[in-house]
Image (spheres, rainbow, N blue to C red):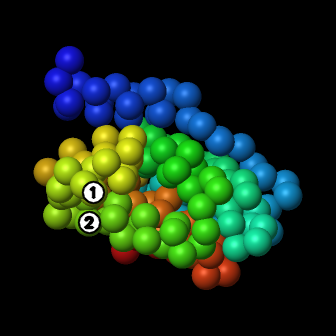
Amino acid sequence: MDLRDLYRDVIVDHNRSPRNFRRLDTADRRAQGFNPLCGDKLEVYLRMGDDRIEDISFEGSGCAISVASASLMTEMLKGRTETQARELFEDVHALLTRGADEAALAELGKLAALGGVRDYPSRVKCASLCWHAVTAALDDVAQVSTE
Ligand code: FES
């Protein structure tokens, strides 16, 4: 199995069985990400404690890339500080738009599976939808658009 097959399988798995796909009733921050190109919306919920993301979840509807990206994001962000979450978004954005070297890929873990969207510019917004939403939630902004 080559790396591209592995990455495709990660996306398929996280789209079929999204992790942390639920409303979080104990959330103290939440925001909705909206992609005006397709009308898809994802809502991200956060519960913060001691500057760390104690719990995170999402719900809504979107394409396979946006759902898989949100699922992977929630797995990666649980337990991270607000600063670490923002830094990880910068690394993911670089991966989606410019690519990443070996060291960056190791840091990104399973999120590296999203790197293939770089060849499909309209898909970059799909993969980054949840990240815009989580950044908006951290900023206490209720809704953000990928426009
Ligand atoms: Fe709507 Fe991907 S097509 S988020």
Disc 1 or disc 2, which is closer to the eye? Answer: 1
Quarter-wise, where is residue 96 in the image? bottom left
- Position of residue 23 measured from the top left corner of the image (x, y, whole percent): 75, 49
At label 1, the amino acid type is Ala
Residue furthest top in the image: 1
User: Is label 1 in a helix, a strand or a loop?
Assistant: helix
What crowding class fits label 2: few (fewer than 14 Cα within 10 Å), some (14-19), or many (20 or more)? some
Q: Is residue 58 above or below residue 134?
A: above
In the rendered image, the quadrant that contains the N terminus is top left
User: Is there any visible trace of residue 48 in the rendered image?
Assistant: yes
Height in image: 45 above or below 21? Answer: below
Residue to which mark 2 is pinned: 94
Q: Residue lying furthest right in this view?
A: 26
Neighbor class of circle 1 (other Cα within 10 Å; few <14, some 14-19, many 20+) is some
Is residue 28 depicted above or below 2 in this figure? below
Residue 104's disc number: 1
- Assess whether mark 2 and mark 1 are in contact (beta carbons under 8 angstroms): yes
Q: Is residue 17 left or right of residue 52?
A: left
Residue 124 in the image: state x and y as whole percent. 29, 58
Residue under the image location 38 percent in, 45 percent down: 109
Q: Secondary structure at mark 2?
A: helix
Numbered mark located on residue 118 in the image: none
Say which residue appears at 20% left-offset and 50% top-offset: 102
Q: Is residue 122 visible to us here? A: no
**Vertical placement of residue 117 versus 3, above or below:** below
Q: Give how far across and how far down residue 131 sits, in percent.
A: 47, 63
